[in-house]
Image (tube, rainbow, N blue to C red):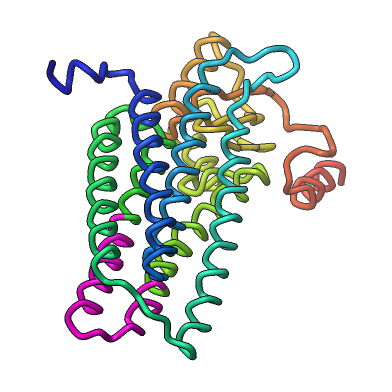
Amino acid sequence: MSVSALFPKDSNSKRLLMAFVVTTVFMVAEAVGGWLSGSLALLADAGHMLTDSAALFIALMAVNFSQRKPDSRHTFGYLRLTTLAAFVNAAALVLIVILILWEAVRRFFAPQEVMGVPMLIIAIAGLCANIFCFWILHRGEEEKNINVRAAALHVLGDLLGSVGAILAAIVILTTGWTPIDPILSVLVSALVLRSAWRLLKESFHELLEGAPQEIDIDKLRKDLCASIYEVRDVHHVHLWQVGDQRLMTLHVQVIPPQDNDELLQRIQHHLLHHYSIGHATIQMEYQRCSTPDCGIHQAANGEAHHHHHH
């Protein structure tokens, strides 16, 4: 039975489940091993693995929730739940890092005995587990699933963590210098902190209904006016993201077209192809927009209206 036969192409959740089980098992092994051998670097790596299995769990949840159909109470389905979970996960990571750093500082002043051999064996096993998980997940990347990608990145970061633990074990076995253990645990923590901080920032931005980072709204407005002849003005633009779907509402002031629906389709087509916004709600207007709450640029519009009256 070949490996490719085990993984059909749409098998995001199967890949994730497998990686989740492997990671969780090895996380427990590393935690127990770190505790028994007295190695902080192993415990740091176990903490890192915990973040992996949390990331994998969130990704699993996301893949399963995105299959659920939206209903009248949750018109977006449950996609936002994954963002919330990512936020909680990132916050937990920051906490773990603080605990490990605290312990590292303590050990620096009171060095502790570390058993090199069990530490080395467990760290190498952890490294193998990470390589295996990364290989599984990386093959799922063609689908461009944001959650699978995030999980693969997590596991990649963890690879470095295991390498750190292995290095610490080798140094302890060859020179008997134990402070290398807390030193490398601090480096591993820095890796964890970096990925946690990014995750925290991105998920927070999304929870605040922020616009996707790679889209510049002002540029988008100018681009629409320049690319589509009938479009005179674009305002009242709102752009946000739910899960990996981009949503947009906007008002466009247009020259009255021959075919209203055809123009609407052209605008939607442009948004989809140039900005991958698949869900745009467009309000077309022939006159300048008269609603006072139009756009977030209230003052600018207000001044424009005054000029008309004089």
Q: Nearer the viewer, residue 61 or 17?
A: 17
Residue under the point 24% across and 64% down: 120
Question: Could you tell me residue 157's position as x and y percent?
Answer: 34, 56
On the image, which quarter does residue 179 sit in? bottom left
The answer to whether residue 165 is above or below residue 195 is below
Residue 170 on the magenta segment: yes
Residue sitting at the far left: 2
The answer to whether residue 243 is above or below residue 155 is above
Residue sitting at the far bottom: 109
The answer to whether residue 225 is above or below residue 166 is above
From the viewer's perspective, tell me whether residue 63 is left or right of residue 308: left
Numbered circles on residues, count: 0
Quadrant occupied by the N terminus: top left
Range shown magenta: 159-185
On the image, which quarter does residue 56 sit in? top left
Question: Could you tell me residue 23's position as x and y percent?
Answer: 37, 43
Residue under the point 44% across and 30% down: 276
Residue 192 on the magenta segment: no
The answer to whether residue 180 is above or below residue 189 is below
From the viewer's perspective, tell me whether residue 7 is left or right of residue 32: left
Question: Could you tell me residue 282's position as x and y percent?
Answer: 62, 23
From the viewer's perspective, tell me whether residue 244 is left or right of residue 308: left
Question: Could you tell me residue 72's position as x and y percent?
Answer: 73, 12
Residue under the point 39% across and 60% down: 45
Residue under the point 82% across and 39% down: 293
